[in-house]
Image (tube, rainbow, N blue to C red):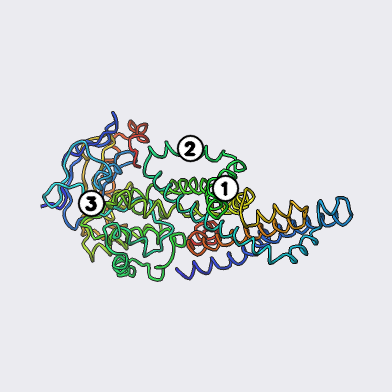
Amino acid sequence: MSGVALRTRRPAGAAGRWPALIGVIAAPTIAFLLLLAAWQTVAVAGLVPADMLPSPTRVVSAAAAEHTVLLRHAIPTLVATVAGFALSVTVAFATATLLDFSRILRSALLPLLIVSQTLPLIALAPLVVLWFGFGLLPKILLVAFVTYFPMVVGLLRGFADADPESERLLASMGASRATVFRLVRLPASTASFFSSLRISITYAVVGAIFAEYAGAVAGLGVYMQSAKNVFRTDLVLSAVGVSTVLTLCLFGAVVLAERLAAPWLRIEQGRDNALAGGLR
Amino acid sequence: MSLLEIRGLAKRFADHTVLEHVSFDVAAGEIVALIGASGSGKSTLLSILTGALAPDAGEIRFDGAPLAQQGRPFAYMPQRDALLPWRRVVENASIGLEVQGVPSREAHRRVRALIEPFGLAGAERRYPRQLSGGMRQRVSFLRTVVQDRPILLLDEPFGALDAITRDELQRWLLDMWRDTGWTIVCITHDIREAVRLADRVLVLPATPGPFVGEVEVSRDIPRDDGLLTDPRVPPLEAQLHAMLRATDYASRSNDASRSNPIA
């Protein structure tokens, strides 16, 4: 029986992987390169002054020349992002758990959380800096602020995704509400948790840069601002490129963490293939 | 003395009565099948036994003593397997023990001892999604048995399976039962299955009330291939058919869908 399952799964996986990979990686890469080519053409043809829109090659060579400075500014941004994100995830976990247990708290706090999302970051950033200074703390708080809400909502939705029949079964075994939460509702939220983690991490770097823009000693936001003040658009764009790479790396780390922490998720999500492959 | 005695059980949801005057006994080592159409309150009865619902009237005695809310003598096997997708076979089967407070290492050890007789050897580290329907049902059954409770409550244990797998699992269950002497209360809507598995088949009425009747199935009747050709079987099945027909399901069919919020 085990042989059947493995035999049918493997070819399906191998055949399905390459087209999927082309779709995920090759197609956007080609689109990106075409965009760069168009940009390069516009810049080289002189349609836009080079000071306003430097060509991609000029941005890259500027970044290469400035790489030690860029790196020095990238590190505080990275630290603030990771620290803020860790804080956000921790607090979101605590909040979501609390809200899952208490209907009263849920009805009292959820509207407030939603309203908190309407606060304009552009106004909030200078205030946070005013309150907490130019150090690391305001950056961490702002990153946590922008990533917190999607995490809480994702976790709450994940808890609600739990199979009621599994919950009833555990209750029939004499499990307390806390045990049902720990053994069913919490693990049931894994998929939803990681998908909101992926969404949140893309906001996180932007949040850190915003805080730095409002005032900080070092960081990509500080670098962008000073480069803009001396009209070095090529350096501003270099910093933008670095922040993008930073976000992509963090995104990759989240995807990797998901694969390591929940190997069953991919089996679960690939279920159509497995069943079509004759598993039954 | 009977291991389990149920007397005058009744349950109402709002103004709708689902169970009334339900009484029956189960002796140790006996397989009792409860049969009835959907909406006859089978699942409500199970929920009362597992403690998920409180009865409005009646008494449940186990081993001569009234049943307490905690530490019930039942291990319940739900209709759908309700396996947890993030747990491998062994981890899924040991969850009942973990709920009881058995350390997971010890729980896994007890489950592993049953993997072979349950026909799951080689599948220990698979996730539910990687199992066939029959194997999932075996894991679900293993999870029930390993809890080591005096009485097994099976809610349509093979209802979701194809005919061939169902036949295979029924034979296997009977083999296991011969060796272990489990006490089993099994709910089903399949007359053939009830006759094949049970010592006694009780027929639930369509309208709330006492059981319509009871059919004894002698253990002299072979339960394997011989079941199909044994001359004593058709009269028993006909008798059960007649009992089910006699109780008027048509008048209840409209209520059936809302009579049982658990189903």
Write down the chain letter for disc 1: A
Q: Secondary structure at mark 1?
A: helix
Q: Which mark is residue A57?
A: none
Q: Quadrant of the N terminus of chain A?
A: bottom left
What is the three-letter code of the residue carrying label 1?
Val
Instruction: Identify the residue at image location x=58%, y=64%.
Output: A12
Write down the chain letter for disc 3: B
Q: Secondary structure at mark 2?
A: helix
In the rendered structure, the answer to whether residue B238 lies left or right of residue B24 reads right
Which residue is the site of mark 3?
B32
State the CA–CA distance, disc 3 to disc 1: 73 Å
User: First in sequence: mark 1 or mark 2?
Assistant: 2
Question: Which residue is at the far top?
Answer: B15
State the CA–CA distance, disc 3 to disc 2: 55 Å
Residue B16: x %, y % from top left? 29, 30
Which residue is the site of mark 2?
A112
Q: How many marks?
A: 3
What is the three-letter code of the residue carrying label 2?
Leu
What is the three-letter code of the residue carrying label 3?
Val
Crowd rating for badge 1 (residues with CA inside 10 Å; few <14, some 14–19, many 20+): many
Could you confirm whether marks 1 and 2 are on the same chain? yes
Which mark lies nearer to you, 1 or 2?
Answer: 1
Please say if the residues under marks 3 and 2 sit with CB atoms less than 8 Å apart. Answer: no
Q: Is residue B249 above or below residue B130?
A: above
Which mark lies nearer to you, 3 or 2?
Answer: 2
Depth check: B120 or B212 in front? B120
Which mark lies nearer to you, 3 or 1?
Answer: 1
Which residue is the site of mark 1?
A129
Write down the chain letter for disc 2: A
Asked which quadrant contains residue A187, the reply is bottom left
Q: Is residue B227 above or below residue B235?
A: below
Q: Secondary structure at mark 3?
A: strand
